[in-house]
Amino acid sequence: NKRPPRGGRWKGNSGVLAGLFVPLLCACFWAGGSAYKPVIIVHGLFDSPKNLLNLQQFISESHPGTNVTIIDLFDGYESLKPLWTQVEGFKAVIYPIMQNAADGVHFICYSQGGLVCRGILSTLPEHNVHTFISLSSPQAGQYGDTDYFKDLFPECVKSEIYHFCYLGIGQRFSVCNYWKDPHHKDLYVNVSSYLALLNAEKPHPNATEWRKNFLKIQKLVLIGGPDDGVITPWQASQFGFYDDNETVVEMQKQDFYLSDAFGLKTLAAREDLITCTFPGVQHVQWHSNETVFHACMEKWLV
């Protein structure tokens, strides 16, 4: 075997190849270190992308180079359109992003947007969502006459809203698609055109397929807290809800969990169901609270 000259290096083709290889190898390591999955953010009721710019900044600072897209659809009062209409609209914009992400994407879906994302995950067999972060979203329903609902129903208290929401015309408004009156559960199940289907509280022929689609996610992160002030009960953000005495029944004791109707129990058994509870955070602060981001979201966005 020949050795290079003492104190020298091989010349000729091998030297040229080394000169090309080393920078290329370094570039590959650099690219690998910064290749985070794209993040897709979906806003909530009455919101628009500008409300979520702090969250976008947190992601960019923590994971430089991440492609973050805040979907600009159904802003402001347009967010009152039926949730199935919103699902189809968001799906049309989001699916091309998924197709261009070979390693998958992450969802961060805030408030009502969390229910829109549930609809997408359930009805899109080809989705490649790795982590679904549900940020203070009424996943088990809403039963509270908070400021949001007082703006819509100024003359009604929560015990009366079902009179409108559980009509065909009521189901044309997004908020009625997840209004869940614990004192009128039969009406809710019969009339609900959205949440009762997603949570498999109403039998339907697509339930098995939707469950299979939903379980393609790798992680489900449920974020909420007792000082939210809008999601009522706040435990609905983690699939808890009222019984007919308005006592909160936790997720693990809900019928849809016990029967594993749409996959929550399976996710828990896989250790892919994460809850993150944060006190002291009001509903409109979740997406701009950096402490919440670092504690509940950052490590899942890789």
Image (cartoon, rainbow, N blue to C red):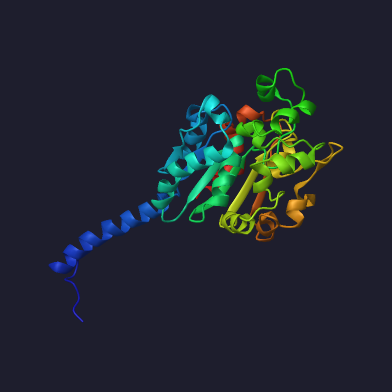
Residue at screen point 52% across, 28% down: 78
Q: Quadrant of the N terminus?
A: bottom left
Q: Note whether 200 is above or below 291 in the view shown.
A: below
Q: Is residue 113 above or below residue 270?
A: above
- Name the residue at 43% across, 41% down: 93
User: What percent of the width, then of the height, locates residue 301?
Assistant: 52, 47
Closest to the observer, 198 or 284: 198
Q: Position of residue 175 (x, y in %)?
A: 64, 32
Identity of the residue drawn at 65% across and 22% down: 152
Name the one closer to the observer, 223 or 150.
150
Specify the quadrant of the image occupied by residue 166.
Answer: top right
Q: Nearer the viewer, residue 266 or 61?
A: 266
Q: Position of residue 207 (x, y in %)?
A: 64, 55
| In the displayed structure image, the side of residue 32 where residue 221 appears, left or right | right
User: In the drawing, does residue 46 fall left or right of residue 228?
Assistant: left
- Which residue occupies the foreground of this view, 73 or 252? 73
User: Residue 4 vs residue 98: left or right?
Assistant: left
- Residue 21, position in %: x, y? 25, 62
Residue that lies at the very extreme toward the top in this rendered image = 155
Quadrant location of residue 82?
top right
Can see residue 110? Answer: no
